[in-house]
Image (cartoon, coloured by chain):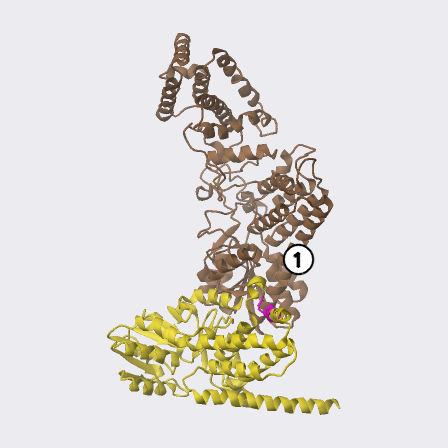
Amino acid sequence: MVTCYNIITIAVNECRTQKLVEYFKAQMRKNPDMASAVAAIRTLLEFLKRDKGETILGLRENLTWATDCLTGVDSSVAVSSGGELFLRFISLTSLEHQVCCLLPWEGVCDLTLAIANLCFSVFQDLSRCKKVMEERGELFLEKISMSRTKVAKLCHTFIKDGTKILTHSYSRVVLRVLEKAAAEKKRFSVYVTESQPDSAGRQMAEALRKLNVPVTVVLDAAVGYVLEKVDLVIIGAEGVVESGLYHKIGTYQMAVCSKAHNKPFYVVAESFKFVRLYPLNQQDVPDKFKYKADTLKTVQNLSEEHPMIDYTPPSLITLLFTDLGVLTPSAVSDELIKLYL
Amino acid sequence: MRSHHHHFAVSTDGPDKNDDVERAKCEGKEMTKEEKQRLRKEKKQQKKSKEKKDDAASQESEKGKKSDGKSSPASQPLPKPTTQKAPSAVPAPAPFPMPASEAPAPADKPAKSKAELKAERRARQEADRASKQGSKKGEVGPQASAGKPKAPPSELQPVVKRLPEHMQVDNPDVLKKLAKKLERQQIPLRLDYGYKVSLFSHLHQYSRKAPLTQQLSIPSTVIHPAIVRLGLQYSQGIVAGSNARSVALLHAFKQVISDYTTPPNEELSRDLVNKLKPYISFLNQCRPLSASMGNAIKYIKKEISNIPSQCKEEEAKRKLLNCIECYINEKIILAAKAIAKYSIEKISDGDVILVYGCSSLVNHILCEAFEKAIKFHVIVVDSRPRLEGREALRRLVQRGISCTYVLISAVSYILPEVSKVFLGAHALLANGYVMSRVGTSQIALVAKAFNVPVLVCCETYKFCDRVQTDSFVSNELDDPDDLIVTRKGKTQLEDWQQVDSLGLLNLVYDVTPPDFVDLVITDLGMIPCTSVPVVLRVKNVDQ
């Protein structure tokens, strides 16, 4: 009997997983320009709407399970951080302003539960509670869809006429910033690194050529060589941590070289990429971010695989442009404390 | 005494004296102003000896008062106290009853300087009398930092309304204020010992061989015996370490509160706070309060003053005891558990961890990590004269953790092998600086040079609002005799006091800038050093 039940639950879960993943992939396909985290959050919202759970606890569990699923598909930091922030945002209604207190990270789940229970008891009705959560979910989605525009607006003023910019790999936020700068009729030229192993840099170069921006593709090994010609370095981020930055492999050496050349090193990131991790060195980066999701599932010996992400410490970063404003690396932690507490 | 008065421009001979007195009667205010100016000029012109001050004071007391009659008795008490003081070379409770009457004068005097002139003159007279006695005491007392003759506070100089946050032991006005305050609370003043290095002369330096309790009269009704015991434990170093001191303090306060009875016509919330003030002064005299103790005391005082007035005494006491228990439990014990949980994430198999001195929190973390079967090796760094690392070593080895022991001079030799440095903290300042045992900033500096991550573990109750960028402004000086060491029957520095140009410096704390610290682990999670003000702000919003 027990095994039968287990099989059924596994089958049901598989079914649900499939549906979830399909919806996620559909979202990504529909709008390739959208950040994967935004697609994930849309998926979660849809999941919330379709969820037929009867209890708050069940609802929360399902949402957590869904987030884990999605990180299994697309193992980027942004997806997991976006999911966490979504969960927090919808659970913390205006009631939390009275109940706000300082909790360690683990206690946050209990806080979410407590608040959800509170809101449930106030609203006397699970469906109404869900409605509130859905509304807040929509609000959250709207806010983060605007985030790239906000970042572009903040950053483009730092690009002046005649600037030579160096960037790394393919980042949609950087692309948006450069679009905005080009729209403001600024003349600048861009150097893009090829960014092996997936040659994402070439994609970036294509997109920039369409904007009529003079662009040169350089080898990853030529970063030190080209740095004396450039004025500033702008890169995107996979994740922003309390002690620095996660981005495509090759970012760390670019940061070290630009520090040596005294060139400003700017990072553009949306706020949903902020995550409360604290790595101290390259070794501390969790495996689930370093390697692609399918690599993690299929490959036995990870030491033979090449990591996709590296960690840049905050001493090498000049400024971060986010939709919360222009921040210094040490202010990131303050913002994180505000976001997560 | 009177023989030197011929140096003065204003003579104190008989006929002149009478003339002046008569003039004083007639011209009232103007006379005293002129006198004031003259007096100031005299002080500026000559380096006075104590006798000259005597003359000035007696002169003023004779001329200052409007009525003749008062002038003669005014001069009478002056020779008496001086003879009384001469035999009492060692500070003892005896001189205290005498200055007790004079002591309030310096405070009253400047406050009333804006008020009526008569009161002002009287206050001036008393002040000069007090300053004269004070300077006499300084002459006869042990050679100490108060060796500088205390200049009588000029009448128009504004007095410090409250003691500044940082000690200014070489400022005689501040010392006087402190002495007056302690006297009012009936607590003996502990005197400084030995020559102080000039950079640190603004700090107290006490000798462990002269504990404050020797100066207490028995029985002492002012100070609760639990507090006396605690003070002795602090000053002798029996209770040492930030957490231990705070917990001991809170337990002693629990004792005080359970023994407390509200006197009639008094409210518990106000009276108990006033009762605690002399205890805190006493403990401060035994050993300067740490930041953690300061925060604990603030919390207790707040709790006491929040007791509603209609609350019955038994219930109030029970509530307070409960509050203290909660505080110890939450802020110290549970915080340690939370910090251990976060820290264990940072310790991985094969790590070589460097620790300095004996921090109860770091030891707790390492023991917890060992219990979770993480394989790591510990290097314990130690330094003289406290050699606290030996205690840490003992505790870790007892658990079965493999350790290495080095002195701080070998730190640059072993650092290439170290993967992480774990440090404890005495306090975390508002600008992100870490105040910890002396030697910590050195280790952080060398670790930074070797690119080894430095992690500081600190509970949030040790966060304080103070801002400090160097270790000079506010520190603690320990007994200099601790630096004397006997090896092979020879004690090198035995006679260090005889050598004029030699000073022994035994610093207790130093301050590490946030650039050298990679991570601070608190019970709220892992934060960078620069986020301390955010935590303080959020905590203040809570409370």
Q: Which chain is yellow?
A: A
User: What secondary structure predominates along the stretch shown in magenta?
Assistant: helix
Query: Number of callouts in the render?
Result: 1
Residue linked to disc 1:
B329
| Secondary structure under the numbered disc 1 in the rendered image | helix
* Quarter occupied by the C terminus of chain B: bottom right
Q: Residues within 10 Å of mark 1 (few under 14, many from 20)?
A: some
Residue A229 visible: no
- Type of residue at label 1? Asn
Side of B36 where B490 appears, left or right: right
Q: The chain drawn brown is chain what? A: B
Identify the residue at horizontal 55%, vertical 52% (top origin): B384
Q: Identify which residue, A160 or B147, lies in the foreground.
A: A160
Residue B313 position by quadrant: top right
Q: Residue at x 62, y 51 (%)?
A: B246
Chain letter for the residue marked with disc 1 in the picture:
B
Q: Where A276 sits versus B491, above or below?
A: below
Front position in the image: A134 or A84: A134
Does residue A54 sit above or below B443 in this rendering?
Answer: below
Q: Which residues are magenta?
A: A104-112
Q: From this viewpoint, is residue B359 visible?
A: yes
Task: Determine whether B462 is above or below B220 in the image.
Answer: below
Image position, residue B306 (x, y; %): 62, 48
- Say left or right for A13 vs A143: right
Q: Position of residue A164 (x, y in %)?
A: 27, 76
